[in-house]
């Protein structure tokens, strides 16, 4: 119970410390993307292109079915190790049971670099608000902050689906009529960013 009270205290006192800084860093991340647009977009598109081309090669050998989900997943372990790798995986209709794994890595460091700075800032400042804070006690708050940054990654992905869909490799990749683009935690909850089935239904309704 005491541990829970400590965790709650860290949350309650940590949020007011970090909220203004997080909002500022959202703006900074946006400015960074504008200044380094070519570098950011090249890294983003090349990461997906590599996975799509791998999938195409396997489909030509009849070793991979039509793609039903293009998944972008983050792992808690990559946050703890500070690699911030985001995994790109393409699945057939069997989803996690797909026998032929095709995956790659995208590194959205242009966003997560600000998370690194925030953690150092938080660790320096929370000690003046909570007595004798141990590093292990900060983990849950740091993961909460990481999830906020991953939402920024989600927004970036959603804003740039059009460029992703314009890749030649995306066009050549065989997909189901109802394929989805999803984002979330591996083996956890995810959000559907694009649903071809819904998009096709809307298009038919407009005819």
Image (tube, rainbow, N blue to C red):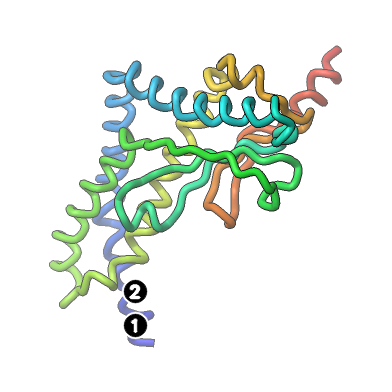
Element carrying mark 1: helix
Q: Give neighbour class at mark 2: few <14, some 14-19, many 20+ (Cα, 10 Å).
A: some
Q: Give neighbour class at mark 1: few <14, some 14-19, many 20+ (Cα, 10 Å).
A: few
What residue sits right under mark 2 in the picture?
7
Question: Separation of disc 1 and disc 2 at Cα?
Answer: 6 Å
Q: Determine whether 120 is above or below 67 in the image.
A: below
Residue at left offset 36%, top offset 46%: 84
Residue 197, x across and y down, in percent: 78, 31
Q: Determine whether 94 is above or below 45 in the image.
A: below
Viewer-side residue, 61 vs 126: 61
The image quarter in which residue 37 lies: top left
Q: Is residue 140 left or right of residue 103?
A: left
| Residue lying furthest top | 207
Query: Which label belongs to residue 206?
Result: none
Q: Is residue 182 visible?
A: yes
Query: From the image, which quarter does the C terminus lie in?
Result: top right
Query: Which label belongs to residue 3?
Result: 1
Residue 178, x across and y down, in percent: 77, 32
Q: What count of labels does the image hold?
A: 2
Residue 83, x across and y down, in percent: 32, 47
Element carrying mark 2: helix
Query: From the image, which quarter does the N terminus lie in?
Result: bottom left
Q: Is residue 83 left or right of residue 120?
A: right
Residue at left offset 40%, top offset 57%: 77
Residue 146, x across and y down, in percent: 37, 52
Viewer-side residue, 173 vs 37: 173
Residue at left offset 56%, top offset 17%: 167
Q: Is residue 55 left or right of residue 81?
A: right
């Amino acid at each position: 119970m005491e541990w829970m009270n400590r965790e709650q205290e860290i949350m309650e006192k940590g949020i007011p410390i970090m909220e203004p800084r997080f909002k500022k860093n959202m703006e900074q991340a946006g400015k960074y993307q504008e200044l380094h647009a070519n570098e950011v977009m090249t890294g983003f598109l090349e990461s997906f292109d590599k996975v799509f081309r791998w999938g195409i090669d396997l489909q030509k050998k009849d070793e991979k079915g039509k793609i039903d989900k293009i998944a972008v997943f983050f792992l808690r372990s990559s946050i703890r190790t500070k690699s911030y790798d985001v995994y790109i995986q393409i699945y057939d209709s069997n989803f996690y049971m797909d026998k032929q794994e095709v995956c790659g890595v995208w590194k959205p460091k242009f966003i997560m670099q600000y998370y690194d700075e925030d953690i150092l800032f938080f660790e320096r400042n929370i000690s003046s608000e909570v007595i004798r804070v141990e590093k292990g006690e900060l983990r849950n708050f740091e993961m909460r902050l990481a999830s906020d940054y991953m939402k920024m990654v989600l927004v970036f992905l959603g804003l740039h689906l059009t460029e992703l869909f314009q890749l030649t490799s995306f066009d050549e990749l065989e997909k189901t009529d109802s394929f989805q683009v999803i984002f979330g935690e591996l083996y956890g909850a995810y959000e559907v960013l694009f649903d071809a089935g819904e998009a096709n239904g809307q298009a038919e309704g407009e005819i």
